[in-house]
Image (cartoon, rainbow, N blue to C red):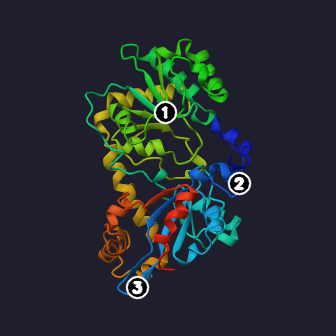
Amino acid sequence: MARGNYERHKPYLRNPHINKPIAEIYADLDAFSWEIFEDQPQRFDTVSFYVLLPPLMYEGKFIKGIYFSEGIELINKLFPGLSSVFHSFAYNPWIGYPWAPIADAYSSLYKNPQRDKWFRETYPHRAHKPTIPLQDCDFINEYWISPKNVPEKDIDLLAVARISEEKNLPTIAKALKVYRQKYPQKPIKLTVLTGHDFEPSNLNTLDECALNEWRQIETILTNPKDYISLVPRVDYYSEMPLYYSRAKAFVLGSLLEGKNRAIMEAMSCNVPVICFQEFNQYARGDSPVFPEGAGLYAKFNPESLADTIYTVLENRTEFKPRYQYLKHSGRKNFFNTCIDSFPYYQHNIPDYKPGDAINNLWLDLAVQQNYQVSLNSFLYGGSPLSHIRGINTIQQNLGELTKFK
């Protein structure tokens, strides 16, 4: 379903020490993409069309919109002429830069000047286009994905992870075993929201890859159900925030993947996060996984992870994940960063102030006039045009979004 050479990523999934020149590592990271292309019709129903800013006509002035998607090339081939009313911002749900040459801007996941320089030197035909380090994964709505009133924090440790090789659940299992040996007076249990459809009483209903990972966990823990509870797929908006809100801490075992939506969701729900120092280390450079005060890093070994989990659980009230997260992330910050990345807007929006486009009165009045909702409401899904999913639905709504062509 994806494109490229995934085998080049496999050495990075469980080995934090890759002995290669950094330029070769960057090339490996870019060798695989989860974008959606025109030869993948089985994925057309999942294509996202996030309208960050809709096209505007107000007081005789036209302003282009911005949409972002993992299917930029596909969308532009199916709907030619969008560039007259939209800037396109491509993102790759995996670790590499997006491949779409037609896009006007690219997500780089993290602010890493060294990797950005490599990208521009390697792809000179795209070197002039903005790379946007703030990719608030899957466009999280920090008001929906937020702390909920729950009776108690009855989940010791939460992971949101498919049972697949990149999630390193066997490594977390080893840490749980070490934890119980070192801290027997305070036993804990891990709850895993798997995203799989399966029958909890019969794990043989898992797919073959997931079963292979689970067998490794069984070998490590002998009685894994004493340490781990597996939860099938849950509803994103109604159930997911409740699980986060019940959790005392969140853990991620990955070394390589996309920016990871669950880290952002946990922080948005005010849950301290734990991950490895080496998580996405080559893509990140010096950029942090999360802001200071939102969690702790462990070294990539079971004992360090066990000790880090213990430290977070013993001191969890000292962390301020949601506060720290929303100082830097969330849709408003994402909007400001994206708008600032295009010189077009600085030159064309009246009374423009860098870093504060979300509060621009002209934009707010223009969105209200054209789409009958405020700019803030549009950004947070107050219009059916703000997040469109699937090629057929995109086609049905483009008339309203391209009325100024």
| Residue found at x 43% / y 78% | 346
Between 206 and 31, the residue placed more toward the observer is 206
Tell me: 246 left or right of 151: right
Q: Earlier in the sequence, mark 1 or mark 2?
A: 2
Quarter of the image for residue 7 reads top right
Dot 3 corresponds to which residue? Answer: 61
Of circles 1 and 2, which is in front?
1
Dot 3, how many residues are within 10 Å of its Cα: few (below 14), some (14-19), or many (20+)? few
The image shows residue 96 at horizontal and vertical percentages of: 63, 53
Tell me: 145 left or right of 164: left
Dot 1, how many residues are within 10 Å of its Cα: few (below 14), some (14-19), or many (20+)? some
Residue 156 bears which disc, if any?
A: none
**Residue 50 seen in render:** yes
User: Looking at the image, do the residues carrying marks 1 and 3 touch, with CB atoms under 8 Å apart?
Assistant: no
User: Looking at the image, do the residues carrying marks 1 and 2 touch, with CB atoms under 8 Å apart?
Assistant: no
Gap between marks 1 and 3 measured at Cα: 47 Å
Three-letter code for the amino acid on which mark 2 is drawn = Ala
Residue 233 bears which disc, if any?
A: 1
Dot 2 corresponds to which residue? Answer: 27
The image shows residue 320 at horizontal and vertical percentages of: 31, 43
**Residue 132 seen in render:** no
Query: Element at badge 2?
Result: helix
Q: Earlier in the sequence, mark 1 or mark 3?
A: 3
Of circles 3 and 2, which is in front?
3
Query: Element at badge 1?
Result: loop
Three-letter code for the amino acid on which mark 1 is drawn = Arg
The image shows residue 371 at horizontal and vertical percentages of: 36, 70
Gap between marks 3 and 2 measured at Cα: 43 Å
Quarter of the image for residue 212 reads top right
Query: Element at badge 3?
Result: strand
Q: Earlier in the sequence, mark 3 or mark 2?
A: 2
